[in-house]
């Protein structure tokens, strides 16, 4: 069959980056298995087992030249992927065949490899998140004082600024980044624990020398690039599957922030205020040539939703591991772990492109502010009238009736908001500077300063780390 005659995941063909696909590729997986077998043999030799330098050299010479067809032939016969690859390696390293996987269980290569791939993937996700924070901070600084309508319940509320709103998005991504960095810092290596986690096979290999068994665990951990004090003290056959639940939860946090940001931009695009970048020859719709659909934000939303949906999968898998382990996690995790990373990678790639190229329409933004601002300043008008000697209740009733009439003009007749003209005509409000009250720059509070503080205290440390 050709590649087009069989299902291929869109995560491979459309969404995920080459970097993430390479991390979760068969080549990376099985070459990491071989590096683990090499590290195990090296450590065993250093601790006195009868393993020769020639055997070590032979293993080291065949870390990446994997004969996948040979491995497939062995697996079709053995129905066991680890044994298949042991045989495939033994064929190209015959002198070392007898000491490959010595004393180990399948989860020595499976679990430790997955932890290595998870750590590398988290590093890449962290860099993507940091890049988005940086882009949004640059955007926020540029538009720190550009007034825009704030929304609560998606109804017009007190004005904010375009830049301040962008800091809310950036803050979500910064929280997600903090969670990812915490996960990297606390991730542990499984190490060398044996079939049920008791290290019994290695104790037998070293004739009951418990110190050597402990040192073997340390050495392999260090040889695989992990600090010796960052390994699990105890495991069953596998590392605790709660770790997967934590990781998938962390990815879901990043996905939720992504979806929130993408959704806000989609809503703002509908308002014709802010849009994602749109290329000169890009087609928005096959039927409606004028369309500028927010394709990237919609893609990010869809992929983020998928990542969020997989978070609960990790909890279910961890909760159903019986005693030292069951195998019902295996097929599930072959999907949930890589696909969560690949889907989030695709979502963050889309959001990176969006946040580096956001388009702002200040005139449309100002028009929307001025349409709603007369309603939003009515309390200030009421207070000003009272200070000028008006009866508070009389002024309130007058403003209330004019607000309803002005709203009717806007909603029923489709005409501009004439509330201020109505109020100016009332002698009760003589002496009030209406123009000053509806100056958008005077309604944005400390939004510009908040942008500056956010960039200085939250974003700058991220920029320095990355």
Image (cartoon, helix red, strand yellow):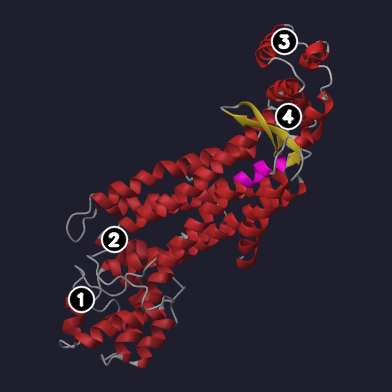
Q: Which residue is drawn at 29% across and 64% down?
A: 239
Q: In this view, does 295 lie to the left or right of 365?
A: left
Alpha carbon of mark 1 to alpha carbon of mark 4: how far?
A: 64 Å
Q: Residue at x 40, y 66 (%)?
A: 186
Neighbor class of circle 4 (other Cα within 10 Å; few <14, some 14-19, many 20+) is some
Q: Which element is circle 1 on?
A: loop
Q: Name the residue under label 2.
A: 240
Alpha carbon of mark 3 to alpha carbon of mark 4: how far?
A: 29 Å
Do labels 1 and 4 touch, CB within 8 Å?
no
Q: Of circles 3 and 1, which is in front? A: 3
Q: Which element is circle 2 on?
A: loop
Asked whether 222 or 206 is in front, the reply is 222
Neighbor class of circle 2 (other Cα within 10 Å; few <14, some 14-19, many 20+) is some
The answer to which of marks 1 and 4 sits earlier in the sequence is: 1
Query: Looking at the image, can residue 350 be seen?
Result: no
Q: Of circles 1 and 4, which is in front? A: 4
Q: Mark 4 points at which residue?
A: 272
Q: Residue at x 70, y 53 (%)?
A: 452
Report if residue 8 lies within the magenta region: no
């Amino acid at each position: 069959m050709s590649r087009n005659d069989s299902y291929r995941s869109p995560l491979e063909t459309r969404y995920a980056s080459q970097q993430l696909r390479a991390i979760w590729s068969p080549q990376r997986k099985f070459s990491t298995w071989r590096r683990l077998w090499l590290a195990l043999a090296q450590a065993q030799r250093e601790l006195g087992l009868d393993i020769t330098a020639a055997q070590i050299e032979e293993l080291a010479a065949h870390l990446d030249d994997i004969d996948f067809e040979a491995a497939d032939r062995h697996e079709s016969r053995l129905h066991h992927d680890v044994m298949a690859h042991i045989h495939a390696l033994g064929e190209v390293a015959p002198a070392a065949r007898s000491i490959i996987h010595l004393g180990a269980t399948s989860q020595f290569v499976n679990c430790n490899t997955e932890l290595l791939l998870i750590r590398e993937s988290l590093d890449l996700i962290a860099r993507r998140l940091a890049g988005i924070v940086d882009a949004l901070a640059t955007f926020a600084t540029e538009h720190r004082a550009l007034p825009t309508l704030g929304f609560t319940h998606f109804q017009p509320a007190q004005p904010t600024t375009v830049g301040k709103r962008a800091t809310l998005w950036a803050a979500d991504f910064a929280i997600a980044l903090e969670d990812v960095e915490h996960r990297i810092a606390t991730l542990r290596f499984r190490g060398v624990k044996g079939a049920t986690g008791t290290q019994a096979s290695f104790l037998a290999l070293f004739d009951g020398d418990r110190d050597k068994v402990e040192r073997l665990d340390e050495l392999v951990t260090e040889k695989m690039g992990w600090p010796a004090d960052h390994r699990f003290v105890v495991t069953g056959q596998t590392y605790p599957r709660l770790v997967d639940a934590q990781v998938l939860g962390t990815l879901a946090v990043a996905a939720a922030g992504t979806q929130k940001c993408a959704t806000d931009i989609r809503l703002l695009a509908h308002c014709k205020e802010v849009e994602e970048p749109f290329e000169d020859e890009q087609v928005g719709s096959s039927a409606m040539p004028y369309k500028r659909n927010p394709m990237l934000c919609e893609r990010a939303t869809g992929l983020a939703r998928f990542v969020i949906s997989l978070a609960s999968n990790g909890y279910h898998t961890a909760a159903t591991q019986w005693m030292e382990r069951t195998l019902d996690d295996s097929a599930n995790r072959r999907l949930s772990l890589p696909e969560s990373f690949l889907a989030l990678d695709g979502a963050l790639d889309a959001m990176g492109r969006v946040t580096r190229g956001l388009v702002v329409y200040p005139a449309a933004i100002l028009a929307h502010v001025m349409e709603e601002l007369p309603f939003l300043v009515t309390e200030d008008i009421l207070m000003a009238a009272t200070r000028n000697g008006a009866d508070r209740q009389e002024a309130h009733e007058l403003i209330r009736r004019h607000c309803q009439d002005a709203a009717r003009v806007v909603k029923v007749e489709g005409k501009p908001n004439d509330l201020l003209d109505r109020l100016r005509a009332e002698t009760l409000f003589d002496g009030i500077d209406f123009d000053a009250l509806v100056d958008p720059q005077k309604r944005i509070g400390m939004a510009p300063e908040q942008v500056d503080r956010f960039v200085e205290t939250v974003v700058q440390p991220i920029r320095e780390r990355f």
